[in-house]
Image (spheres, rainbow, N blue to C red):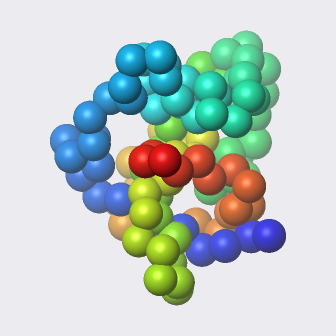
Amino acid sequence: MNIFTKNINGSSSISPKPKAGNGSCWREFWEKRTGHIINPFALYICPGCGDNVYGKDVFGCHVKKIGCQDDSWYIVPMCQKCNNKHDQVFYIDENLLTPVND
């Protein structure tokens, strides 16, 4: 099911790096939690904009759901362009969301 999400502005300065054993960056955190590995040399369709990007250019972006009571933060793999669109709203597959705090 697709849902509306929004980039969290300034999350990199607020959210610390993932805890030990969860990867060295937020993309690796997403990979470890979901079991999906993003090949750095394969093309990947960014769920935010639909552009084709190489896996090496995919980031673990902090987002939150819009239009519901859930105020949790989630990680979703998106391209750098989408990651830098502060306060941008995206309509993406809810299955791609991985909670930051479990």
User: Which quarter of the rendering shows the N terminus?
Assistant: bottom right
Q: Residue at x 39, y 18 (%)?
A: 20
The answer to whether one can see residue 37 in this image is: yes
Q: How many marks?
A: 0
Q: Residue at x 60, y 41 (%)?
A: 77
As rendered, which of 45 and 74 lies closer to the eye? 74
The answer to whether one can see residue 54 in this image is: no
- Identify whether 48 is placed above or below 58: below
Left or right of 41: which side holds 98?
left
Q: Residue at x 74, y 61 (%)?
A: 93
- Identify whether 40 is placed above or below 102: above
User: Which x, y percent locates residue 81?
Assistant: 49, 45
User: Which x, y percent locates residue 49?
Assistant: 64, 55
User: Which x, y percent locates residue 89?
Assistant: 50, 70
As rendered, which of 81 and 5 lies closer to the eye? 5
Q: Residue furthest front?
A: 102
As rendered, which of 23 and 48 lies closer to the eye? 23
- Identify whether 76 is placed above or below 3: above
User: Which x, y percent locates residue 6?
Assistant: 46, 67
Q: Residue at x 43, y 24 (%)?
A: 25
- Identify whether 28 is placed above or below 68: above
Left or right of 26: which side holds 19?
left
